[in-house]
Amino acid sequence: MKRAALKTTYVCRNCGHTPSKWEGRCSRCGTWNSVDEHAAAAAVHTAGRRFTSPVIAPELESVELSEVPGDDAPRIATGIGELDRVLGGGMVPGSTALIAGDPGIGKSTLLLQTAAAIARQGRTVLYASGEESAGQIKLRAGRLGLEGKGVHLIGTGDCSEIAAHMGSKHPAVVIVDSIQTAYLTDGVAGLGAGGASSRGTVTQIRESAAYLSEQARMSGAALVLTGHVTKDGAIAGPKVLEHMVDAVLQMEGEPGGVLRLLRGVKNRFGPTDEIGVFEMRGDGLAEVADPSQLFLAHRQASTPGSAVATILEGTRLITVEIQALVTPSALPSPRRVSNGIEMSRLLLISAVLTKRLRLPVATSDIVVNVAGGLRVREPAADLAVALAIVSSLTDRPVDPGMAAAGEVGLGGELRPVPQPSRRASEARRLGFNGCLLPEGGRDAEDGIATGRDAPSGRGTKGMIAVATLSEAVRAAIPEPDDKPGHSKGLSHGRQ
């Protein structure tokens, strides 16, 4: 039998690339002198055949899924309703959550407020910061009006030191700000001598997150990590970092604005695509219980190019203003600018308006914006985007008492959206007379249908059914001599 040999591998400590041989400059990220040599045991062969190890008895007994007890530990309520909404009811003991966002967006402010709110419940919170000292955190707590009793601060990113405090303080929640400043020393978590790299590298971020997550699972503490984002808005560090954690929350906001959105991207213990809305004030982040009122606060209903959409974000209905500006283009290729709407949806809608409605938008510059800085991902906003574009093109305002929700198909048809009655009820709560909805939609909860075949009296719920985009345009943007909402008799279905 041949002896086991040591196989040499090479790993870039900056990007994690594994070239087949040593490189002075990494062929992936272009960093000089970042490729380190590692030794690993090669497979043992016998007479040209792969050697198989003898069968060993397992140390752990397997358990059938049906026999696993369901005595889950209760969640840790953060005391901040919007954050609990995104987390699915609070933090899960032993879990790891990652909160990412641009520098200065408010991640540290939110977590310091969360730490103080949890401490007021009589729980211990450990706050480790590799970016700020304890004195700097105390100054920020003073500006926020937080006493901080029960919040233990350590100004280090050393994971060994953080783990030691977790063992001595027995905190319910551990906050590490940020994972890019966390590091492991030689000989910790499998990093051999010379295997440690500088802070912020791929190797350190990956190993530090894995080490802290393991410590949190063993101690039963809820671990919260903060992370930076790149210029493209992606979470900085290795992509595997998002797979290692249990929840990923993204904090968004317009530069210089006061609105902050916390969006759930991944959550193993709750719903995804849930959002929390905050307003940045002098005393920190304040919860916005009714975001629809905030998004529509400064709307000018009589201005052409403005339409209102009712969209579904997780389990929450939000009503937002869609603005559009259409101008003749002086360029060979007219521009398409989208802020808050996916560019692919804008291109689809403009193509349908050109082909199906014969509108001259192909030679015009189109700018679409979602007021308030919200990024709308649901296709139900298509109809409001199309109405705003047509309104700006024709210089006629959309009926101010009408909201809209519907997905636009390539044939100019409107496809049903989920929960139409809830959307109409939300529109009426905000003072709108009705909500344009595609025909054929049906609520799974109460069986309410939209369309000409719907039972009589459904108009009292404010649902105005239309089948095509052209019908919706005629219903929402009447001719100058037509009454709003009653153009050509199309406001309640097909002609």
Image: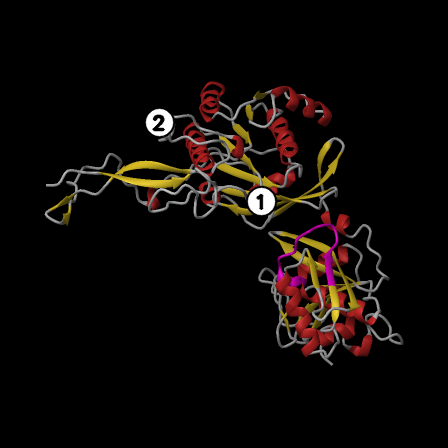
Q: Which residue is mark 1?
A: 230
Q: From the image, tell me which residue sits under label 2.
A: 193
Q: Is residue 368 magenta?
A: yes
- Quarter-of-image position of residue 133: top right
Q: Is residue 248 visible?
A: yes
Display colour scheme: secondary structure
Side of 319 relative to 67 (left or right): right
Side (left or right) of 99 relative to 188: right
- In this view, the residue in front, 210 or 411, is 210
Three-letter amino acid code at disc 2?
Answer: Ala
Q: Secondary structure at mark 1?
A: loop
- Magenta segment range? 367-381
Asked if residue 287 is among those painted magenta in the image, a careful observer would answer no
Q: Quadrant of residue 299?
A: bottom right
Disc nearer the start of the sequence (1/2): 2
- The percent position of residue 42, horizontal first and vertical second, equals 23, 41
Residue 214, above or below 377: above
Residue situated furthest front in the rendering = 24
Q: Position of residue 397 (x, y in %)?
A: 83, 66
